[in-house]
Amino acid sequence: MTAKASAPIDADRIAEAVTAAHAKHQKNRRGKNVGYIPALAEVDPQLFGVCVVTVDGQTFSVGDARCCRFKAISPDRGGQLPEARYLG
């Protein structure tokens, strides 16, 4: 079995998808902030943004997404979760 080469990241296509997702869902106010995480309970519920981070570290954000915190499963770390990172 040979490994497939990954496709190059098309930044314009990702930016368009992030913008489209934000436009489609920005008026949805059905959810509410979780109360069991104090920092999230204090966030203004009217804020809304979309942020995507690619595997090579590029960030794409629209709306109130000024930063992303994320955890990803990394196969090279045996499936362990690295610490959440501030991406800016």
Image (cartoon, rainbow, N blue to C red):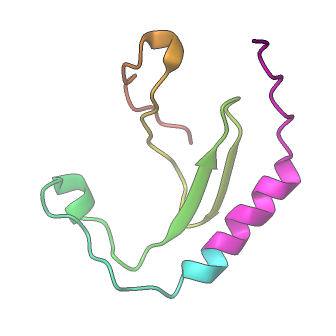
- Position of 55 with respect to 14 (left or right) is left
Query: What residue is at 66 percent from the left and 31 percent from the top?
Result: 55
Q: Quadrant of residue 35?
A: bottom left
> Does 22 lie within the magenta span?
no
Which residue is the extreme one toward the front?
1
Dividing the picture into quadrants, the one containing residue 58 is top right
Relative image position of residue 15 (x, y in whole percent): 77, 58
Residue 71, by quadrant, is top left
Give the position of the N terminus as an image quadrant.
Answer: top right
Residue at horizontal 44 percent and vertical 42 percent from the top: 69
Q: Camera-side residue: 88 or 49?
A: 49
* Residue 16, magenta (yes or no): yes
Q: Which residues are magenta?
A: 1-21
Q: Is residue 47 above or below residue 80?
A: below
Task: Say above or below: 77 vs 63.
Answer: above
Q: Residue furthest left?
A: 36
Which quadrant would the C terminus be assigned to in this image? top right
- In the displayed structure, 31 sits above or below 3; it is below
In-image side of 9 versus 80 (left or right): right
Residue 68 drawn at (x, y percent): 50, 47
| Residue located at (52% from left, 49% from top) | 67
